[in-house]
Image: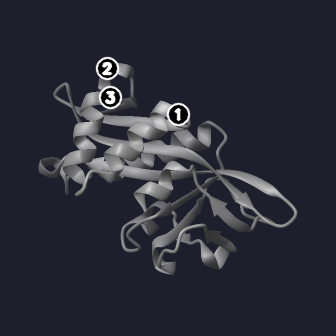
Amino acid sequence: MEIRQENPSDIEAIRYVNEQAFEPNAEAVLVDRLRDRGVVTLSLVAVEDDSIVGHILFTPVTIESENAKYEAVTLAPVAVLPEYQRRGIGAMLIEHALDECKRLGHNIVVLIGHPEYYPRFGFVPAKAKGLLSEFEVPDEAWMVAELAPGALDGVGGEVRFQPEFADAM
């Protein structure tokens, strides 16, 4: 299994992976719109036997309080072709991508996801850390990870996503 940055020749395969992994295809459309607007922070693919079988995407978000703005990224989506699921590919993508985000200097990652899946990667409830989502989501699905110790010290407020996320919610 190879995990690498996406390149332009991967776009159709990435769309296919997201269409197959999610019903309906809101995530595939979201990925295309974010890429088209040039607001992708990190996009990685998992490749097996020269075929793309998984994809993960990160985009910038801002954390806005009354007195300050902070930069962070969001993980959305992570997708694996159904016939390749439950083989650890999603976990490999997440671990590799979080390491790459840290290497790139991103210290805070937020996401809306399954509360029983993401804690193993260091995600904790975001509301308990002083972060609110601009979208109405269940508290247990709203999560954050610090990629550097103390990254959330003194940081709090509402997390604002790229406008394309409003259509996907």
| Label 1: how many Cα within 10 Å (few below 14, some 14–19, many 20+) | few
Q: Which residue is mark 2?
A: 9
Counting from the top left corner in percent of width and height, residue 77 is at 39, 51
Q: Nearer the viewer, residue 126 or 28?
A: 28
Q: Residue at x 26, y 29 (%)?
A: 12
Mark 2: few/some/many CA within 10 Å (<14, 14-19, 20+): few
Q: Give the vertical position of 126 relative to 5 (above or below).
A: below
Instruction: Name the foreground residue: 82 vs 89.
Output: 82
* Three-letter amino acid code at the position of disc 2: Ser
Where is residue 23? Give x, y as percent.
22, 57
Residue depth check, mark 3 versus mark 1: number of the one nearer the observer: 1
Figure quadrant of residue 145: bottom right
Check contact, mark 2 vs mark 3: CB within 8 A. Answer: yes
What is the residue that sits farthest to the front in this orientation? Answer: 167
Task: Give the vertical position of 156 relative to 79 (above or below).
Answer: below
- Residue 37: give its label: 1
* 153 versus 97 height, above or below: below
State the residue lying farthest toward the left. 83
Q: Residue at x 51, y 65 (%)?
A: 123
Q: Is residue 151 visible?
A: no
6 sits left or right of 66 in the view: left
Q: CA distance from mark 2 to mark 3?
A: 6 Å
**Which residue sits furthest right?**
67
In three-dimensional space, the C-alpha distance between marks 1 and 2, rounded to whole angstroms, equals 18 Å
Q: Residue furthest top?
A: 9
The structure residue drawn at horizontal position 27% and vertical position 45%, both measured from the top left corner, is 18
Per the image, label 2 sits on a secondary structure element best described as helix
Check contact, mark 1 vs mark 2: CB within 8 A. no
Circle 3/circle 1 CB separation < 8 Å: no
Question: In the image, residue 153 lies at what x, y percent?
Answer: 77, 65
Q: Amino acid at mark 3?
A: Ile
Disc number at residue 11?
3
